[in-house]
Image: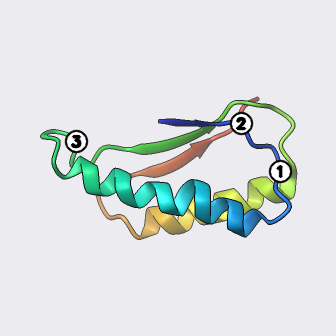
């Protein structure tokens, strides 16, 4: 699980690329070398409430896309209440 504190971004796609896409690949790479973690879930958890709804949509779409490209590994996002 990786904690995130972002609530918005001027350029959501650039933010997503930096904070999700580029971080997911090393997690997947590392997991293959740790016995029992080959198909470990990857969860990004946002810790601050009041997230911009457009930002939520962009992040959810990106996570859904990443999850679709990683068979056997669940990639998800959780939002603060």
Which residue is tagged 3? Answer: 37
Alpha carbons under labels 2 and 1: distance apart: 9 Å
Of residues 3 and 56, the one nearer the viewer is 3
Which residue is tagged 2? Answer: 5
Residue that sits furthest to the left in the current view:
35
Q: Residues within 10 Å of mark 2 (few under 14, many from 20)?
A: few
Residue 35 position in % (x across, y down): 12, 40
In primary-sequence order, the first of circles 2 and 3 is: 2
Please, what secondary structure does the residue beneath circle 2 have?
loop
Residue 80 position in % (x across, y down): 72, 31
Q: Residues within 10 Å of mark 3 (few under 14, many from 20)?
A: few
Residue at image coords 28%, 57%:
29
* Left or right of 69 in this view: 21: right
Residue 21 position in % (x across, y down): 52, 63
Residue 62 position in % (x across, y down): 61, 65
Residue at image coords 19%, 52%:
32
Please, what secondary structure does the residue beneath circle 3 have?
loop
Given contact means CB atoms under 8 Å apart, are the residues at marks 3 and 1 in contact? no
* Left or right of 58 in this view: 75: left
* Left or right of 41 in this view: 64: right
Residue at image coords 16%, 39%:
36
Residue 69, picture quadrant:
bottom left
Which dot, 3 or 1, sits closer to the camera? 1
Which disc is residue 8 wearing? 1
Alpha carbons under labels 3 and 1: distance apart: 32 Å
């Amino acid at each position: 699980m990786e904690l995130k504190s972002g609530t918005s971004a001027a350029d959501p796609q650039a933010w997503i690329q930096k904070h999700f896409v580029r971080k997911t690949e090393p997690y997947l790479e590392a997991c293959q070398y740790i016995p029992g973690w080959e198909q470990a879930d990857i969860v990004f958890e946002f810790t601050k409430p009041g997230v911009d709804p457009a930002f939520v949509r962009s992040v959810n779409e990106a996570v859904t896309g990443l999850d679709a490209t990683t068979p056997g590994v669940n990639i998800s996002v959780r939002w603060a209440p």
